[in-house]
Amino acid sequence: MQPAQQTIHRQASDQQAADQPAADQATMFQFEQDFAGSLRCIPMAVRFKLDRCGVKLSLRQWSHFEAEERSRLLQRACHKPPEVEAYRGELEALIRTRSNQPAEYLPIEAAPPWADASRVPPQLIEFAAGLQVPAPSSVRWATLSPLQRFVLLKLSRAKHDHVNFIPAMREFGLIDR
């Protein structure tokens, strides 16, 4: 789907992200430092922004970006609709310029599970149980930032490397071990 055809009407998640401090959206988590600290891998904060703007970015495309461009994508705000549009525009231009490919697009979820602070998603509960760690309580889930909730859901997906799930839970103060 072309960006002009996508309408970003995500009222609940827009409000959640608008309430999120800009600094939180530029966070580099401790569990990412080994592989994303140099920005050779795509940090979770950038992945969050990719989902918000509906652009698919491969690691290969990311690796073609200059270090300053990667840093700018990490630091740049992407929570209010005009910022999301600007972020998408910059990303499309970088992909086209650096990798000589057109940008590819993903559907933007109207109500992503991370946006609901009142309910721990069943996917996360089941995944935590499979690792024999407690899932966040509803109270703790509600205290997490939208980015932290996004990260836990992303790390619990079937096609994701799960090695960082427990370190993320630990970093977010959800488990002790």
Image (cartoon, rainbow, N blue to C red):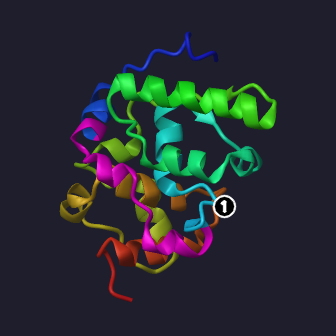
- Looking at this view, is 131 or 170 the one in front? 170
Whole-percent x, y for residue 24 in the image: 32, 54
Q: For residue 35, which quarter of the picture?
A: bottom right
Q: Residue furthest top?
A: 5
- Looking at this view, is 48 or 34 the one in front? 34
Who's the residue at 32% across and 34% down the image? Answer: 13
Labels in figure, total: 1
Camera sees residue 6: yes
**Image quarter in which the C terminus is found:** bottom left
Whole-percent x, y for residue 125 in the image: 40, 63
Q: Residue furthest right?
A: 100
Camera sees residue 156: no
- Looking at this view, is 146 or 21 the one in front? 21
- Looking at this view, is 41 or 142 the one in front? 41
Q: Is residue 78 magenta?
A: no
Tell me which segment is drawn in magenta: 17-35
SS majority, magenta: helix
Who's the residue at 52% across and 69% down the image? Answer: 32
Determine the secondary structure under disc 1: loop
Q: Is residue 26 magenta?
A: yes
Who's the residue at 27% across and 59% down the image? Answer: 144
Which residue is identified by label 1? 40
User: Is residue 129 left or right of 60 when viewed as pictured?
Assistant: left
Who's the residue at 73% across and 28% down the image? Answer: 96
User: Is residue 127 left or right of 22 when viewed as pictured?
Assistant: right
**Image quarter in which the N terminus is found:** top right
Q: For residue 116, which quarter of the picture?
A: top left
Whole-percent x, y for residue 47 in the image: 53, 48
Whole-percent x, y for residue 134 in the image: 36, 76
In the rendered image of this protein, does residue 80 appear above or below residue 117? above
10 Å crowding of disc 1: few (<14), some (14-19), many (20+):
some
What amino acid type is highlighted by mark number 1?
Arg
